[in-house]
Image (tube, grey):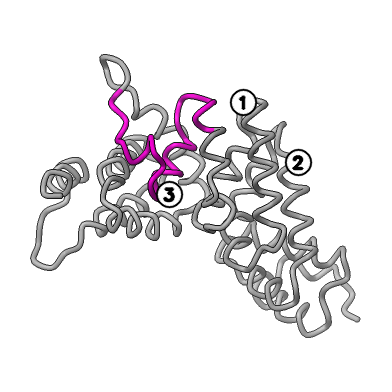
Amino acid sequence: MTGTTDGLRRFTGHEETPGDPITDSIHRLVLAGGRGSRAVLDDLSCALFNVVSDTGLAEQALDVLAGAEPRTWIELDAALRSWTYGYHGPRSTPRAVAKMSNPLAVLLAACGRDGREREKALAHPAMRVDARLAPVLAIRTVDWVGAVRRRALRTLAEALSGADAAALRAVVPVAVRLGERHRGQALTDLVRDAVLRADAGTLHAVRRSEDLRARRFVLEVALQAGRMDREQLVEAALVDDHRIPQLELP
């Protein structure tokens, strides 16, 4: 993996320091990606393709990527497709991506330029069970290709059928933003139903999301369903006080 590591350091501007893991470079790019820089997102795309063939690095990279902001996920999807084409045509796709040999490879395949390949990636078992892939699965539900959207909605419905807090915390922040798009209503409905089915512990955990818009969405769904008692309303008021003043506490 020496070539892969050296290539990643060149693309990310990573300066080697003793004991400094390569995932630090990806972490920096993920943090910078929240500012919406296309150059950073292109570098992040390159970094992900560079590590995907090494199972250990791919796992570490996906763990880091799982903490990305919703905006980063949405804009990275477009950057990944653009990065696969250079100035002189398509770049070669790593075998790991073509074979979907690990979860990061599945993610990259799901963001490819070919709609048939995106649809194939959505059918991979990891899409239903790995919460780290939930954001890209949500993104595919608003894909411009109808067959991809339908496959994504079916897979997401399966993934959310018994969703735990990790899955909901991963998908809700992205879903509330994509739900505003003209093809986003089906996604919003799926996620709302999953929140309504969640047990009390899961609902409580998702209400503590770091993302403000996700907290608002879950709070509104829970309120409409009568899933909030007085103590929970008071707690919500302390966290997001501007959302609660109009409510009459029981």
Tell me which residue sits at (40%, 48%) in the image. 104
- Residue stretch in magenta: 91-118
Q: Is residue 94 magenta?
A: yes
Q: In this view, does 77 lie to the left or right of 134?
A: left
Tell me which residue sits at (27%, 17%) in the image. 87
Amino acid type, label 1:
Trp
Image quadrant of residue 3?
A: top left
Tell me which residue sits at (80%, 63%) in the image. 196
Give the structural element (helix, strand or loop) at label 1. Answer: loop
Q: Do the residues labelled 3 and 2 touch (CB within 8 Å)?
A: no
Where residue 190 sits: x, y (%)? 75, 50
Amino acid type, label 2:
Ala
Where residue 17 sits: x, y (%)? 9, 62
Quadrant containing the C terminus in the rendered view:
bottom right
Where residue 148 sits: x, y (%)? 62, 31
Q: In this view, does 225 lie above or below 138?
A: below
Q: Front-most of 33 and 156?
A: 156
Spatial distance from mark 1 to mark 3, Cα to Cα?
A: 24 Å
Prevailing SS of the magenta stretch: helix
Instruction: Report which residue position mark 2 lands on.
Output: 186
Instruction: Report which residue position mark 1 lands on.
Output: 144
Q: Are marks 1 and 2 in contact (CB under 8 Å)?
A: no
Give the structural element (helix, strand or loop) at label 3. Answer: loop
Q: Front-most of 189 and 3?
A: 3
Res 209 label: none
Q: In this view, does 244 lie to the left or right of 130?
A: right
Instruction: Report which residue position mark 3 lands on.
Output: 34
- Looking at marks 3 and 2 on the same chain, the residue that comes earlier in the sequence is marked by 3
Within 10 Å of the Cα at label 1, are there few (<14), some (14-19), or many (20+) other Cα atoms? few
- Looking at marks 1 and 3 on the same chain, the residue that comes earlier in the sequence is marked by 3
- Looking at marks 1 and 2 on the same chain, the residue that comes earlier in the sequence is marked by 1
